[in-house]
Amino acid sequence: MTISTTVELTLYRPEYLADLTQFHLPEEQLQFTALPVDSLEEALTDPQRYPIVIMAERKVVGFFVLHTGQGILDYDDYTDTPLAEVMLIRALLIDSRYQGKGYARQAMELLPAWVRYHFPFIHELLLAVNERNLAAQHTYTVAGFKDLGHRPIGLAGSQRIMHYFL
């Protein structure tokens, strides 16, 4: 089956910074995720974090961070996969100007193959999504992520842990 998409995933490069600093989210979405400028500095100084840019038709439309290693120890209780084989997805967002076009869903559908290629030792993708963030939950579910029932409490309330087994 061939999936046609205008979306691409790429590792962050400095030429994307100007676009990322212009990202905007509606106030109600800021409670669920960080803007790229808020998570990029930490991602660039931590060798176990990989900032990822979502491109659509040669425009920067979204951003997220992949995280491995010691920084994901808090998630050990939510998976049976050895943590050395788990990658956490953090801070996914689509700039408000590009929301509603399916870019987040397409990015999450592309991500498993992208991770298999770039990180062949990873066997599980893991994320935490706020229980009140129904749009994000739907996006992850449609992209193939599974909810196994884990409900930790995060800074903004109850979280739903979702898994994608590679």
Image (cartoon, grey):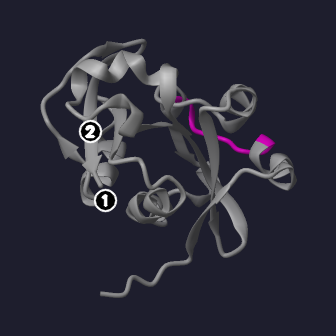
* Residue type at tag 1: Ala
Mark 1 and mark 2 lie on one chain; the one further toward the N terminus is: 1
**Callout 1: SS:** loop
Nearer the observer, 61 or 127: 127
Question: Does residue 80 appear in the picture of this structure?
Answer: yes
Nearer the observer, 73 or 129: 73
Q: Looking at the rendering, which quadrant does residue 129 occupy? A: top left
Q: Looking at the rendering, which quadrant does residue 46 occupy? A: top right
**Callout 2: SS:** strand
Residue 70 placement, left or right of 128: right
Q: Look at 30% across and 32% down and name the residue there.
A: 82
- Residue that label 2 marks: 162
Residue 3 spot, x, y in % from top left: 39, 82
Question: Does residue 131 appear in the picture of this structure?
Answer: no
Q: Look at 40% across and 18% down and name the residue there.
A: 73
Q: Which of the image's four quarters has the C terminus?
A: bottom left
Seen as rendered, the residue at the extreme bottom is 2
Region of the chain picked out in magenta, as a range: 21-27
Q: Look at 65% across and 43% down and name the residue there.
A: 51
- Residue that label 1 marks: 143
Membership of 163 in magenta stretch: no
Residue 83 spot, x, y in % from top left: 36, 30
* Residue type at tag 2: Met
Residue 87 placement, left or right of 37: left
Residue 56 spot, x, y in % from top left: 62, 70
Q: Look at 14% across and 36% down and name the residue there.
A: 148
Residue 108 spot, x, y in % from top left: 41, 57
Q: Magenta: predominant secondary structure element?
A: loop
